[in-house]
Amino acid sequence: MPDLRLILESVPKEQTERVIEELMTLFTIQRPYAEQIVLSAPIILLDHLTDEQASNVASNIIWLTKLGAIVRLTAEPAPTSMRRLTWPAPPNIAVRAGNVFICPHCGGRFVVQPVGKVVLKAVTPKPATRPVAVAAAPAA
């Protein structure tokens, strides 16, 4: 099994703030940590990923790439001098698939969930009802 890792290579200067916000969302971390990560690029965000974890990560980093951040999910050896994050437990980005639709314009997230078995039923339309005329009461 290859040793897979996620590397944040670079962040466009004009997108720094949005990438920080995205890192906060993806890794459930506070702003100071996300800022430090961006300033430390290139940096290994995740290391020693399984194939399943790498698949989850790939489905979660789409918006980072849309923002122009250069991220690589790779099995290539990383330079020993490259900074790396260590996590006490794998973060959600590696544990859960990115089951969200991300708006390509605003980055808004919409959860996509299976609804189970959908049963379509034929519905007989109700007959149209006529409006009922109501006479106004005479003024006293």
Image (cartoon, rainbow, N blue to C red):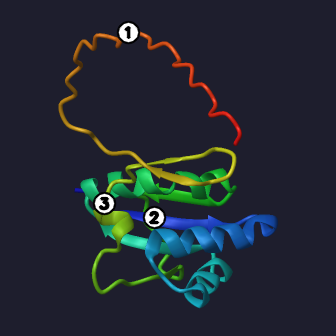
Would you place residue 33 above or below residue 114 in this image? below
Residue type, label 1: Pro
Closer to us: 137 or 88 = 137
In the rendered structure, find residue 6 and report the number of the disc placed on it.
2
Q: Nearer the viewer, mark 1 or mark 2?
A: 1
Residue type, label 2: Leu
Local SS, label 2: strand
Closer to us: 14 or 139 = 139
Going 40% across and 58% down the picture, which residue do you hit?
57
Residue type, label 3: Arg
Whether residue 68 sits left or right of residue 52 in the image: it is right
Going 65% across and 68% down the picture, which residue do you hit?
19
**Which residue is labeled 1 in the image?**
127
Q: Earlier in the sequence, mark 1 or mark 2?
A: 2
C-alpha separation, residue under disc 1 versus residue under disc 2: 61 Å
Local SS, label 1: loop
C-alpha separation, residue under disc 1 versus residue under disc 3: 49 Å
Query: Residue extending furthest bottom?
Result: 32
Would you place residue 119 above or below residue 48 in this image? above
In the rendered structure, find residue 96 and report the number of the disc placed on it.
3
